[in-house]
Amino acid sequence: MIPSPAPTGQSAAVRAARRQAVSVAVATGLYGISVGALAVAAGLNIWQTQLLSMVMFTGGSQFALVGVIGAGGLGGAAVASAALLGGRNLLYAVQLGPLLGLRGWRRLLGAHLTIDESTAVALAQPTARPDARRAGFWWAGAGVWVCWNALTLMGTLAGDAMGDPKAWGLDAAAAAAFLGLLWPRLAARRAQATAALAVGIALVTSPWLTPGLPVLASALAALAVGLWPGRAHSGADQEGSP
């Protein structure tokens, strides 16, 4: 009698989730080099940069914080910008909470590893394979944390040795990284409208406001698009979003 293939199939799904998680972790970790170099240019030392990368551990927030500080912005504006961008992880937690079902210290660890990549890999797995979804979350979250911090350290060491990163064009790395992360998310018309409005607000306010505040002002774009008259009667986007 041939054994049931269910366990083998289940293991294959978990292995596939792990492979996907590792590839995502390595690709994402490469951005850490820019964070490290920019942090040194902004005046942080190696230990401060590593602590920031280990504890904050959300790339968009780190780029925002370092970018505002490097541009001479106030600490309050830097923290507010970082917190605004990091707030999206709360929405991820709402999705992942029932799936992971964590308790105690595992819940705290899971909260720390709830980022774009761990959420994406977990939710990309088949709904019938909760073990694959959990494996995708943990492997992606832990993998990104290890790769990100290792490459952040490389960036701080390289940035400290090369001198002024502006001479190498690294002062534009934060904006380029943001654009690279954002571009795949602009398929829906609503996302495109939000991005266009945010860019317009930032361009108008940047000459007049302290660095960091235009980012906060641009956040009003999402609210404006969400409250646009007639949105409730427009049905779905062309892409089928509700």
Image (tube, rainbow, N blue to C red):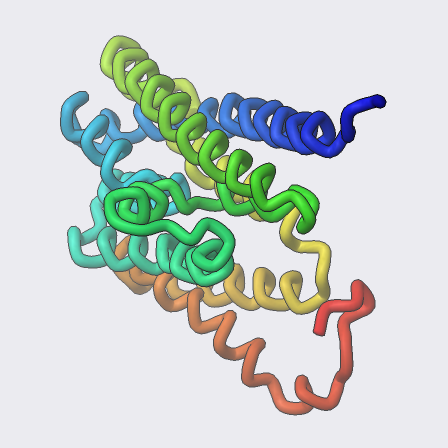
Instruction: Note whether 215 is above or below 229 in the view shown.
Output: above
The answer to whether residue 101 is left or right of residue 209 is: right
Count all numbered tags in the image, as a single digit. Answer: 0
Instruction: Note whether 180 is above or below 194 in the view shown.
Output: above
Identify the image quadrant of residue 228. Answer: bottom right
Viewer-proximal residue among 145 and 53: 145
Instruction: Note whether 177 is above or below 203 in the view shown.
Output: above
Viewer-proximal residue among 201 and 180: 180
Q: Please state the horizontal and vertical placement of residue 48, each as a whole percent of the image.
A: 15, 30
Q: Please state the horizontal and vertical placement of residue 229, each as a whole percent of the image.
A: 63, 90
Residue 102 in view, yes or no: yes
- The residue at 51%/41% (across/down) is 134
- Which quarter of the image is occupied by the C terminus? bottom right
Identity of the residue furthest to the front in this view: 1
Identify the image quadrant of residue 144. Answer: top left
The answer to whether residue 113 is left or right of residue 201 is: left
Identify the image quadrant of residue 19. Answer: top right
Viewer-proximal residue among 138 and 54: 138
- The residue at 44%/57% (across/down) is 97
Residue 166 in view, yes or no: no
- The residue at 47%/67% (across/down) is 201
Instruction: Note whether 56 is above or below 169 in the view shown.
Output: below
- The residue at 84%/22% (across/down) is 1
The answer to whether residue 227 is left or right of residue 64 is: right
Identity of the residue furthest to the top in this view: 161
Q: Please state the horizontal and vertical placement of residue 26, each as a whole percent of the image.
A: 51, 22
The answer to whether residue 177 is left or right of residue 165 is: right
Q: Please state the horizontal and vertical placement of residue 231, each as a whole percent of the image.
A: 67, 85
Viewer-proximal residue among 61 and 4: 4
